[in-house]
Image (cartoon, grey):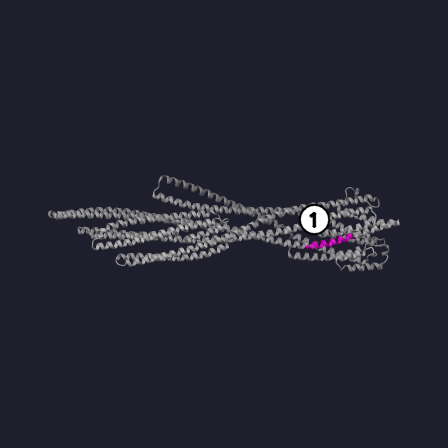
Amino acid sequence: MEDERWTTSPEQYSQTKHALNGMNEDKDEYGLALDDIDADIYLDESTRENPLYALNGHSSSAVMNGTSEGTTSQKLGDRWSSNSSKPAAMTLKEQEKIIEEVKSENFGLKLRVFFLEERLEKMSPEHMNGMAQENVDLKANLQRILSELRQYKELLTRARATIASLEAQANCELQHGMTEEQEEEFRNAIAERLELIAKVKQLTQRIEAMEQEANAKDSELLQLRSRLGELDAQLDDTEELKARYEDQIRELQDQLMEYQQNESRLYERPREDEGWKVQCHELEQELAASQEELSQARSEMNAMNRYMEQQKDELAKARMDAAKLARQLEGERDRRPYSQDDVDLEELRKLYEQLEAHCHELVALRKEDAIRHDQQLEDIVAELDDRTAELAQTQEDLRNARHMLHSKDKAIAVLEEQIKQLGLSLQDIEAIHDEEMAKMKAQLQSGFAASLRTETVPLRDFQQIREDLEMSEQRYLKIREDLELSDQRNLKLGGDLELSEQRNIKLCNDLDLNEQRNMKLCNDLDQSEQRNLRLESKLRMANEQRMAAETLNAEASEQIAELTNELNDRDDRLRFYEEQELQLSKDTEARLKLNSDLEDLLQVIERNKAAIIEKNDLIDSQAREMDTQSRENNRLNIKIRKLNDANATLEEEKEQLETELRDRATTVAMLRSRLTELELQLSKKQRDDQSAGETSKSDLVERNTLLFTILQHLENILGDDDRLEGNMLPKPSNNFDYFSSHVLSRLKSLSGLFVLFERQAKELENKTLVKLNQFKKQMNMRLMQLEEYETTINKAIERQKKLRSQLAKKQTENEELQAKQLLLARTIAELKGRAKSSDRSRDVEARFRQLELKLQAERTQYVKSEELWNARIRELEKRTKNAEEGRQRDRQGYKEKLAALHDANEADRKTVDGLLLQNAYQQEIINSRSQTIDTPKRSNTPSGSRVERGSLNLDQLWNRIDHLSKSVDREKSKNIQRDEAIKNALSRMSGYLDRRILDQVADILYEELEQVE
């Protein structure tokens, strides 16, 4: 992240670009003009007096203005070769042109400074304030998440304490023995414990997810802090580089001043001294103003870390000049003898070579830094893209979770309706049972009244009573079958939710108790039949006594027998009625208990609804948090776009600065070439003087002045020397040895500055290498995460195929159940055809109609369930497609599901064993009845034919019971196969479940399969 102060608007950028282009054009013209001036600097007395030659020289310089740098250097080399003659002096027009060009350059620099000042005024530290506010927001979010974690941990401790207390109570009650009510309470406690365990597991999963989010946010905070540290380090580096760049700008300014002074000193002539001095003074003033503006512009540009790139082309040119100097010096050595000037030039050449090597290394390092910065920007952009993708995935997961909660609410409403229907069916069954008991009472009363009136109880009435009892038993069996069907429905509905399963098991237990009570009623009826048999035996004895005592006293014996019979009958009736009243009171108590259980179920459902509402609120809060995070990511994206725009503008400014530096480097190279030419001329003059033996005072004065100006420029670059007394520079005319030693010491100090610059450049290189390694590690981590996501997606696709195969199996099972329904419909139709003879058959038909209505309702429910299943399959396919990007889940959920399935299967097995016991008990009753009926079956009386019909009905019932037992065995085997298939599927899936998103998708699919079952 870079400072927002370096970002500019498009208008400012266009204005600065236009100004810089104008400046570059002016500088090109100015460089060519300076070349022309340099070409005409060194004049001899013979050539100065010839104006025509001067005009020719300036015409050649005018031609040079339209050519490139290569051609200008080549022409200058031709002009200054040994074969060509020396150029003439400059005219006043050319000098005026130079002054105008310098003024235009000054104007361009002023424009540039104006735009830079305007840009500085528009800058503000808003970016740093925004980063501080973002850090504060992240800290507040972290504290809030930590408080939520504490609350969940407290809930966990409470739940564990309640579980421990329930286990202690259960162990105590199991050690001491329990009644039926205590067993029911114990079962309720176990169910509540299972609910608590499920809630605790959900809470633990949620706490783990929250902890992971907290860790992720902590890592983000650490990243932001590291970025802030990097920004602080960059600011410190920019300040240091600012100071260095200012020093370098001062050096360049001093070089320009030296160049101007050299020009002014070389053009000194007694005739033009005054005019040149005035013009040079004006030029110095203008250049001083332009240099001040240049220093301000350089200080702003140098804050952008671009000094190394600025010096690249300049050092390349310096290297070329050094090579040329080396060649020229080697030629000069061959031509002239060894002198002190040669030593100086040799030292200068070595310094140039050192500078050239250092600059070459710095340029290479700067290129590597630019490549690294580009890679860092690309990594940051890729990281933000990944964050946006993760946010989109989490939002989709939240939407899917909401949809699942909505579907669960619908399933709970369906279960409530089914519970209400079961309650109504229980009330209908109880009403039918009461009606049958009332009918039985009325029949018994009518039978006993008839026996009292006729004074004998014939065998036909007893057989009729037996038939009525058999019919009541058949009705009771039908009622029991209805109850068994209701039990099976309850067991099927219990597969949707674990809570509803436990409540349905309670209802089944209550129904089993009712069945036991009904069995007691059957036992009471059997006892009443035995009493009737005893009465028959007593009546037979009384008849024999009456026949024996007819001769003695018929009337007295009849009255005594009637009285005894009446007394016995009344006693038996009273006992029977008392037992029935007790049984009815027990039945009413059982009904009240069932109603209370139903109310408890409704309360539990309401609690579940409240819990679901709370979960929805939590999900909404999490969705809000995700929205805030998405907003923050959008802010970061906007900031990165701004940074990219700023980088683009900086790159364009960098290119412009490079072009400017190239132009300036060309001018410096030309100046250095002129210096070499001057040295060559001086050496020629010295050889001429040595050969001729005549030294002119004017030449010595010019040489001394030139060397003195060079020393002045060095002092301006390096600062005043403390060793000098009164800041008085040594003069070559007084003591040349002291003067040369002083110049060499100043050049050595200049080389020391270059060494410091190289050292700091290496430190910057080390810092950039450390940052590059950090970014490489981050890239490797990202690549590993991408590979893991690809593996999870492939595993999810394989799991989807397996689930589709399970769906095909479920469809085949549904078709088998439809075939069973058809068989039941046929058996019902056959029973209807058989039961059309008597009045009692009408009751049976009415009941069969009710059963048909129930079957139709079940068929409609089955059709609805199929439609729901198809819709859910489509939804599952969509969800699997959406969940291919990220899947995670814990393996322990499947273990819990397996335990729940095992518990459900054990409950089913218990119910099946209870049904088998009931069938065995009914078989024993039927066998006992068949033995009692065998005696009258042999006679040819109409009662015998009724007994035969009853036996046929019993045979049919027995066949039906066998059929039902076989269907129960089939269902049991299917349940076992399902358990094995589920275990195999889970064992296969346990190897593929390494990520949480995949496990969540599998959990949702598994719950929907249970709902469909």
Residue lying at the far left in this picture: please name it: 551
Can residue 303 be seen by looking at this rendering?
no
Q: Give the image quarter of residue 53.
A: bottom right
- Prevalent SS, magenta region: helix
Q: Position of residue 480 (x, y in %)?
A: 32, 51
Which residues are the magenta region? 655-673
Q: Secondary structure at mark 1?
A: helix
Instruction: Say if 826 sits above or below 337 in the image.
Output: below
Residue 46 locus on image (x, y percent): 86, 56
Magenta stretch holds residue 663: yes
- Residue 545: in magenta span: no
Q: Position of residue 706 (x, y in %)?
A: 81, 49
Q: Which residue is mark 1?
A: 361
Task: Tell me which residue sits at (36%, 43%) in the image.
Answer: 183
Query: Residue 802 location in percent, x, y?
Result: 46, 53
For badge 1, the amino acid type reads: Glu
Q: Which residue is nearer to you in this view: 242 or 689?
A: 689
Q: Nearer the viewer, residue 793 or 455?
A: 793
Counting every numbered tag in the picture gives: 1
Would you say residue 310 is visible in this rendering? yes
* Depth order, front residue of 585/226: 226
User: In the visual, does 497 lie left or right of 208?
Assistant: left
Structural crowding at the residue carrying mark 1, measured as other residues with C-alpha within 10 Å and reported as few (<14), some (14–19) or many (≥20) = few
Q: Quadrant of residue 739?
A: top right
